[in-house]
Image (spheres, rainbow, N blue to C red):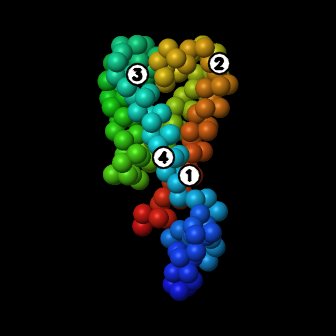
Amino acid sequence: MISDLGRQLNDPSTINHLPCQSDAKAGQPSTVPQFVWRIAEFIIGGLFIYAGIVKVADPVQFARDIDNYKILPWTIGVRLAFYLPWLEIFCGLALITRKLYLGGLSILTALIVVFITASVIAKSRGLDITCGCFGHASDNLGFAWHLALDFVLLAGLIFLMRTSSKKLV
């Protein structure tokens, strides 16, 4: 196994198909190059950093957006409006810098699941909500687009979680 890996390292034609640590245990070569996962980390981390910065810039509007869901009392919504954006920024930075990576990934996954659940509940109750995720930049998108974007982010986070938890052990 080690001699095979040494030969693969010296052969430039196999550089994109080197086994990762988790796949080497299973005896199967990786089908996705490492740089693809790194790009996904930058995109997802960057989206959460951007969303957090937009919310930090106007926490009162974000508190109103939280209140529109009619799930939490106003006082809790205001506290969340000041706390959640910073959590998103720090977790996005964790994905990009790979410091506290699994913690940031886990928190972002939990946040997106809670947000999807709250959005579906609000929509089923007939509430016309704007998500507030990206400030006024996302006001023109409908509920279906927001939900699709959220599920794409959730899928990306789950795939990153599955691949990275094996590599970081």
Residue kind at label 2, given as amino acid type: Gly
Q: Earlier in the sequence, mark 4 or mark 1?
A: 1
Q: Which residue is mark 2?
A: 142
Residue kind at label 4, given as amino acid type: Glu
Distance Cα–Cα, label 1 vs label 3: 27 Å
Looking at the image, do the residues carrying marks 1 and 3 touch, with CB atoms under 8 Å apart? no
Q: Which residue is mark 3?
A: 54
Tag in front: 3 or 2: 3
Asked whether residue 29 is in view, the answer is yes
Q: How far across and down, in percent of the image, does residue 61 sit?
A: 40, 13
Element at label 2 = loop
Looking at the image, do the residues carrying marks 4 and 2 touch, with CB atoms under 8 Å apart? no
Tag in front: 1 or 3: 1
Distance Cα–Cα, label 3 vs label 4: 20 Å
Name the one closer to the observer, 81 or 72: 81
Quarter in which the C terminus is drawn: bottom left
Distance Cα–Cα, label 4 vs label 1: 9 Å
Q: Which mark is residue 36?
A: 1
- The residue sitting at 51% across, 37% down in the picture is 112
Residue kind at label 3, given as amino acid type: Val
Name the one closer to the observer, 28 or 18: 18
- The residue sitting at 33% across, 31% down in the picture is 86
